[in-house]
């Protein structure tokens, strides 16, 4: 039975899953220690920082990892080294980071006043955390594209392990400033990259520079999709802070609840890192049956994950957030039901979005997320209690994204032309997954 189950998941899932599991545990430990150490207002500030870091960091730099992984995988299948791809990837990541830093710096006082209760130091921590994510995601793209999944998992595991150790020390030392709990998001990922650089450096190789179009052709639309997807899943905490700034408990309680209901997303993340290269390979070789088979298995796995997580969250969520995170009892079983339903729909959207991406339908993927975010904004502005509005916005936005993607996938598939050897671009097939 175990052997049959292992054959259902993409290669590398277990290696990446182990590291991602530790990284996921670190998130819970991080927020749990902070929740018990910080005042309600300070935990709110950390919650907002956390939401912004992962909205912008994942939204902007995860696409770079995916595009680097895609091109490296295509070149690796042709016996070409990843060095030229890494050089372009680093340049793109640095340019994107510079844009973010300039924007954050220009709006420093505005961000501090409206999101961090006037604390400008939290804005500085935000910049450092974004820089760390830029470095981490770029190197992970090379590790993923070369299918060095044990090293990929090791980088995730080191990041998570260091977070656990650092926040434990902060808690034991009685630190009560949210700034230091934010600094952990800077130090841990940078250290994990340094400790897993050897395989990247050994594999770099030389060769002619990769054409910019190879990496950038779909990156703009992919970044738009990634940012919008992170808005759907993370903006609730930020909206609560903006809509109810005097409620010092709401944002922190919502983040604690979201961390619990998103456990299936951590599990899916272990499969996602190896899923894209796997689909890229089947696309390049024209293995349509293998491509669709992988897509069906992915949908089945995330559905089981989402339903399992939903049962636990609805039954135990209100009690767990109090015990684990010292969160105030402002959320009930109904709140967790909405959040769990939203997470299941979000998982479907993630899988179907990869389907569109693997079909080279970046524009369709971006359209679906745009429609979902528009629905989220409309629901957020409706006259209703703030917490309910935020929960319904997450749920309805996710459902509409998944439904739109399903319609777009049924609307027809096409096989993009196979790229020539000198221009290893998007792998092709009739099917899909992001």
Image (cartoon, rainbow, N blue to C red):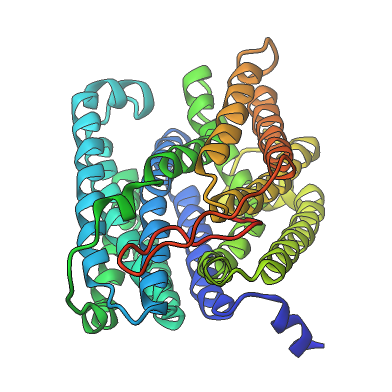
Q: Picture coordinates of residue 181 (x, y %)?
A: 35, 52
| 33, above or below 369, in the image | below
The picture quadrant where one finds residue 279 is bottom right
Nearer to the camera, 228 or 362: 362
- Residue 197 makes an appearance in the image: yes
For the point 64% across and 23% down, the residue is: 375
Q: Position of residue 431 (x, y in %)?
A: 66, 56
* Image quadrant occupied by the C terminus: bottom right
Q: Nearer the viewer, residue 134 or 36?
A: 134
The location of residue 373, given as percent across then percent down, is 57, 28
Residue at image coords 38%, 78%: 78
430 left or right, relative to 167:
right
Q: How many marks?
A: 0
Q: Position of residue 258 (x, y in %)?
A: 61, 45
Quadrant where the N terminus is found in the figure: bottom right
Q: Looking at the image, which is closer to me, 251 or 258?
A: 258
Up/down of 372 relative to 323, above or below: above
Q: Quadrant of residue 302?
A: bottom right
Q: Is residue 159 left or right of residue 198?
A: right
Q: Residue placed at 41% from the left, 75% from the top?
A: 152
Give the quarter of the image for residue 337.
top right
Q: Is residue 172 visible?
A: no
Q: Residue placed farthest to the top in the image?
A: 383
On screen, residue 281 above or below 382: below
């Amino acid at each position: 039975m175990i052997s049959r189950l292992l054959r259902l998941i993409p290669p590398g899932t277990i290696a990446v899953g182990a590291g991602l599991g530790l990284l996921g545990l670190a998130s819970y430990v991080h927020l749990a220690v902070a929740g018990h150490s910080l005042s309600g207002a300070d935990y709110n500030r950390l919650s907002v920082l956390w939401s912004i870091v992962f909205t912008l960091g994942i939204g902007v730099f995860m696409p770079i990892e995916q595009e680097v992984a895609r091109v490296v995988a295509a070149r690796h299948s042709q016996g070409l080294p990843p060095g030229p791809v890494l050089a372009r990837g680093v340049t793109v990541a640095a340019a994107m980071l510079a844009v973010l830093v300039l924007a954050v710096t220009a709006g420093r006082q505005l961000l501090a006043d409206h999101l961090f209760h006037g604390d400008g130091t939290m804005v500085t921590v935000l910049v450092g955390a974004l820089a760390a994510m830029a470095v981490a995601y770029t190197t992970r793209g090379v590790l993923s594209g070369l299918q060095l999944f044990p090293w990929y998992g090791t980088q995730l595991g080191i990041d998570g392990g260091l977070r656990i150790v650092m926040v434990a020390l902060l808690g034991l030392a009685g630190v009560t400033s949210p700034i230091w709990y934010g600094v952990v998001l800077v130090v841990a990922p940078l250290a994990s990259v340094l400790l897993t650089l050897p395989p990247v450096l050994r594999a770099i190789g030389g060769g002619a520079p990769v054409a910019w179009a190879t990496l950038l052709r779909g990156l703009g639309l992919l970044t738009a999709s990634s940012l919008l997807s992170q808005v759907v899943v993370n903006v609730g905490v930020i909206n609560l802070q903006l809509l109810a700034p005097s409620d010092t408990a709401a944002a922190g309680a919502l983040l604690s609840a979201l961390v619990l209901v998103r456990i299936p997303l951590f599990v899916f993340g272990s499969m996602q890192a190896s899923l894209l290269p796997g689909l890229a390979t089947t696309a390049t070789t024209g293995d349509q049956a293998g491509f669709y088979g992988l897509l069906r298995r992915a949908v089945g796995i995330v559905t089981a994950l989402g339903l399992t997580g939903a049962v636990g969250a609805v039954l135990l969520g209100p009690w767990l957030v109090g015990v684990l995170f010292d969160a105030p009892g402002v959320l009930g079983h109904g709140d967790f039901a909405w959040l769990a339903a939203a997470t299941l729909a979000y998982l479907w959207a993630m899988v179907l979005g990869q389907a569109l991406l693997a079909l080279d339908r970046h524009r369709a993927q971006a359209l679906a997320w745009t429609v979902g975010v528009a629905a989220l904004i409309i629901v957020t502005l409706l006259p209703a209690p703030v917490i309910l509005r935020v929960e319904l916005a997450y749920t309805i936005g996710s459902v509409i994204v998944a439904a739109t993607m399903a319609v777009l996938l049924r609307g027809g598939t096409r096989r993009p032309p196979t790229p020539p050897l000198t221009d290893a671009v998007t792998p092709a097939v009739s099917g899909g997954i992001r």
